[in-house]
């Protein structure tokens, strides 16, 4: 079993650097990601708020029709008057057109519809940015897991070589059994770390599969000597200002506040009269019948009416005033939510900016630390060979080198993700930024 796991590890770590890149994965996610598809459906539904609001300003046409069979028995009390038994059918139809002339609440609802469309656009814009971030996070998580597995395998190989050297030295009497035990302990620990790295890689690959709907055989890795760029403009204050106004979440909440303002006007319009133009066209007819043995003729009536209808609300049990107070309270909530969203956007911009600048500093520090660690490892190996260093010194130096390589890779990925989050905070993240990151990958 252990041998099969080792073969699998080598296959995963040594897979050729060809296949899907970040741009391709992003485009696959746009077609397969369930969260993005859900957001798109919500956006499509939100576009219907405008025609729904406009409908309140347009005429309403309705038609009614009826047919009734009548059987009337009428007994008169006057002496000598026979009872009347009449049987006949009545039917008719009526067309009614109502054109609002003055309905202030309908006008406010139309304005709310336009704002609701703008809000849906902003929410969908945020969903697009979230897709970029989720895809990039999943992509770099897989790359980091691959790097961790490769480093774990390389570390295990190096420790195995040191273990063999310790055994040989013990056999010839130039080293103690302690060196062998220490090397064996580190080798066992490296094996456990390799298994953990394999498991983590599989988890990260499945997470990527959830986003894009399939599992690429390999992903294009980041170039070894990639040069990271500072944010442009290189001013945290400007990024914060951009986030407070340009963030899609801020824009969506701004639209929500304006909708709440219009809702107050809409509810207060319940105190205002309404004026409608009403036009009708109808026809009613009755078939002939028999009453008291006498045949009655049928009738056929056509009618056309045009007029205006004024409705003046007087008292509705306090419901209008209650809804007015409710709308005012909800407007205050929307204003507080907007303030909180702006503060969160500003905080996100600051965190992302610091993530980029500090991340770049960390990358440089880790690059220098890697050089120093490698030099220390070489020196310890040489010292061990000539007898001035012991086995544990070499093992510690090896562990330091591999840990620094892993931390360097993670710092690079985190810095690239911070660059994307900074663009997202300002509301300017898009496919162009994915292409820019994609250009840093090996082809």
Image (tube, rainbow, N blue to C red):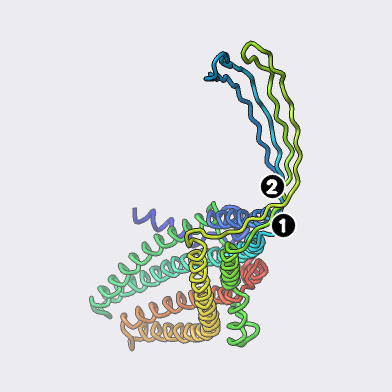
Contact? badges 2 and 1 (CB < 8 Å): no
Q: What residue is disc 2 on?
A: 60
Please tell me whether residue 181 is drawn above or below residue 45 in the rendered image: below
Q: In this view, does 433 lie to the left or right of 280?
A: left
Residue 282 appears at what percent x and percent y?
72, 35
Residue shown at 40% from the left, 58% from the top: 6
Would residue 121 be seen by someone viewing this image from the given angle? no
Would residue 427 be seen by someone viewing this image from the given angle? yes
Residue 301 appears at what percent x and percent y?
74, 30
Q: Callout 1: helix, strand or loop?
A: strand
The picture quadrant where one finds residue 97 is: top right
Q: Choose between 427 and 74: the one closer to the eye.
A: 74
Q: What residue is disc 1 on?
A: 101
The picture quadrant where one finds residue 43 is: bottom right
Q: In this view, does 215 lie to the left or right of 158?
A: right
- Point out the image quarter for the C terminus: bottom right
Q: Choose between 439 and 169: the one closer to the eye.
A: 439
Please tell me whether residue 274 is drawn above or below residue 251 in the rendered image: above
């Amino acid at each position: 079993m252990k041998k099969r796991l080792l073969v699998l590890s080598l296959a995963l770590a040594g897979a050729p650097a060809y296949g899907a890149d970040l741009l391709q994965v992003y485009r696959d996610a746009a077609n397969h990601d369930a969260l993005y598809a859900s957001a798109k459906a919500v956006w499509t539904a939100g576009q219907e708020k405008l025609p729904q609001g406009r409908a309140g300003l347009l005429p309403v046409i309705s038609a009614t029709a009826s047919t009734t069979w009548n059987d009337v028995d009428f007994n008169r009390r006057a002496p000598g008057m026979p009872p009347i038994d009449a049987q006949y059918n009545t039917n008719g139809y009526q067309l009614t057109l109502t054109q609002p002339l003055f309905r202030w609440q309908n006008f406010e609802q139309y304005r709310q519809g336009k704002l609701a469309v703008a809000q849906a656009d902003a929410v969908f814009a945020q969903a697009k940015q979230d897709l970029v971030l989720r895809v990039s996070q999943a992509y770099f998580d897989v790359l980091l897991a691959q790097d961790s597995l490769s480093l774990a395998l390389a570390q295990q190989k190096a420790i195995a070589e040191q273990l063999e050297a310790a055994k040989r030295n013990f056999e010839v009497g130039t080293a103690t059994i302690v060196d062998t035990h220490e090397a064996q302990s580190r080798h066992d620990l490296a094996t456990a770390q390799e298994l953990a790295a394999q498991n983590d890689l599989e988890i990260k690959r499945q997470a990527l599969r959830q986003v894009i709907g399939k599992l690429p055989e390999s992903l294009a890795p980041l170039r070894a000597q990639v040069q990271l760029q500072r944010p442009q403009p290189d001013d945290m204050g400007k990024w914060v200002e951009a986030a407070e106004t340009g963030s899609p979440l801020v824009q969506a909440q701004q639209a929500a506040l304006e909708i709440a303002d219009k809702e107050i006007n809409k509810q207060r319009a319940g105190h205002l009269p309404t004026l409608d133009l009403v036009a009708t066209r109808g026809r009613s007819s009755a078939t002939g019948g028999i009453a008291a043995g006498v045949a009655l003729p049928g009738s056929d009536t056509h009618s056309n009416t045009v007029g205006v209808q004024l409705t003046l609300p007087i008292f509705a049990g306090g419901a209008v005033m209650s809804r007015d107070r409710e709308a005012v309270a909800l407007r205050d909530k929307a204003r507080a939510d907007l303030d909180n969203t702006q503060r969160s956007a500003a905080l996100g911009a600051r965190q992302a900016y610091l993530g980029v600048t500090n991340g770049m500093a960390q990358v440089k520090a880790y690059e220098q630390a890697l050089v120093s660690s490698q030099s220390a490892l070489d020196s310890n190996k040489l010292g061990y060979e000539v007898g001035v260093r012991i086995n544990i010194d070499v093992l510690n130096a090896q562990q330091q080198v591999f840990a620094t390589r892993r931390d360097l890779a993670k710092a690079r990925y985190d810095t690239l993700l911070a660059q994307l989050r900074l663009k997202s905070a300002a509301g300017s993240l898009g496919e162009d930024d994915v292409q820019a990151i994609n250009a840093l990958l090996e082809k």
